[in-house]
């Protein structure tokens, strides 16, 4: 029996990529999943798939995580129907493919609203349920670029750095409140994230990065994340080359900048 059996796990950005894969792994672990994303049709398709694995395991709540009114209504629905959230996985996000000097502030703000403020809003809305109940577990899906800067990802990297600061602080503040915090730093995962990345004018990039295409299978990534939640791991880095680059940055900073500059030319 896994530690997640019977738990209510709320996953944002659940309609595709890492979010979808985590939903499947969570249901296999015996959890009930609350799936949120903007695309209701994709959520319905995923619900049907999960219900075939475990009937009654899935609740869908379509929402736009950047809208405070959506979050407020969604939290109330969860409170009224399920009563509690045991694990909140802040996974919704959008990447970037544009140089900082060419990217207008409004695009930077769009990325921050999705990648940082949405997680902060939802977490603050869910925390009272956990504090007034039996505790819980908060998970933030950051990125390896939340540990170091990377070309064409200025706002994305900054938002993911901000996630780290916010959730590390929460981990300290909530240490004695029976609320655990896990921060995940995925590297190159084989998902469609580059296709929906924002360019300098806010349009979709629409291209599958070569390195992304050769990334870690999303199912393997999801298994690692669910396992990390089960064992209450404080942080998880996924991706050997990217993890190596992080340590190169710490011990050989000059070498890091040379490597990152060259790598940025090869998407």
Image (cartoon, rainbow, N blue to C red):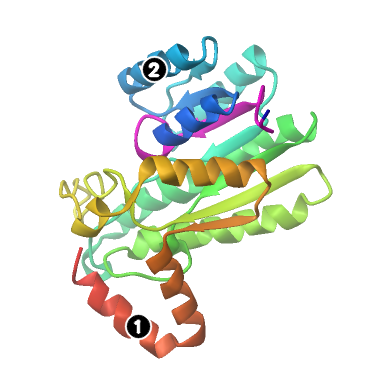
Of 225 and 9, the residue lying toward us: 225
Q: Is residue 13 magenta?
A: yes
Q: Is residue 108 magenta?
A: no
Q: Residue shown at 30%/84% (left/top)? A: 258
Residue 101 rendering spot, x and y as whole percentages: 24, 71
Which of the 4 image quarters holds residue 78? Answer: top right
Quarter in which the N terminus is drawn: top right
The x and y percentages for residue 86 are: 68, 31
Q: Against 82, is 257 above or below?
A: below
Find numbered disc 1 in the image and state the secondary structure of the residue it sits on: helix
* Circles 1, 2 touching at the beta carbon (< 8 Å): no
Quadrant in which the C terminus is drawn: bottom left
Determine the residue positioned at 58% across, 17% down.
77
- What residue sits right under mark 1 in the picture? 257
User: Please, is residue 243 above or below residue 21 in the view?
Assistant: below
Q: In this view, does 230 lie above or below 37?
A: below
Q: Position of residue 216 (x, y in %)?
A: 35, 51
Using a 10 Å C-alpha cutoff, classify the residue at mark 2 as few (fewer than 14 neighbours), some (14 to 19) or many (20 or more). Answer: some
Q: Quadrant of residue 139?
A: top right
Q: Residue 238 carries which label?
A: none
Per the image, the residue denoted by label 2 is 49
Q: What element carries label 2?
A: helix
Horizontal arrangement in the rendering, residue 3 relative to residue 44 (left or right):
right
Using the numbered discs, state the Cα–Cα distance from disc 1 to disc 2 in whole angstroms: 44 Å
Q: Is residue 210 above or below residue 5?
A: below
- First reached walking from the N terminus: tag 1 or tag 2: 2
Q: Is residue 69 visible?
A: no
Q: Start and end of the magenta stretch? A: 2-19
Residue, x 48% and y 54% (percent of image)?
Answer: 142
């Amino acid at each position: 029996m896994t530690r997640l059996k019977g738990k209510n796990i709320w996953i944002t950005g659940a309609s595709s990529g890492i979010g979808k894969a985590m939903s499947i792994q969570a249901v296999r672990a015996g959890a009930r999943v609350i799936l949120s994303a903007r695309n209701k049709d994709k959520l319905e398709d995923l619900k049907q798939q999960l219900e075939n694995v475990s009937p009654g395991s899935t609740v869908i709540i379509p929402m736009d995580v950047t809208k405070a009114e959506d979050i407020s209504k969604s939290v109330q629905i969860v409170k009224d129907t399920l009563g509690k959230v045991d694990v909140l996985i802040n996974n919704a996000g959008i990447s970037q493919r544009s140089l900082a000097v060419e990217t207008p502030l409004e695009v930077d703000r769009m990325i921050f609203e999705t990648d940082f403020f949405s997680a902060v809003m939802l977490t603050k809305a869910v925390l009272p349920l956990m504090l007034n109940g039996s505790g819980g577990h908060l998970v933030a899906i950051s990125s390896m670029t939340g540990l170091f800067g990377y070309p064409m990802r200025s706002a994305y990297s900054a938002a993911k750095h901000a996630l780290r600061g916010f959730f590390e602080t929460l981990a300290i503040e909530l240490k004695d409140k029976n609320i655990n915090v896990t921060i995940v730093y995925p590297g190159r995962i084989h998902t469609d994230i580059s296709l929906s990345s924002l360019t300098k004018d806010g349009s979709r990039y629409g291209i599958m990065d070569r390195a992304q295409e050769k990334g870690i299978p999303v199912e393997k990534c999801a298994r690692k994340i669910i396992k990390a939640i089960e064992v209450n791991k404080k942080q998880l880095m996924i991706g050997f080359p990217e993890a190596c680059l992080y340590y190169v940055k710490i011990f050989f900073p000059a070498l890091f900048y040379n490597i990152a500059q060259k790598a940025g030319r090869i998407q």
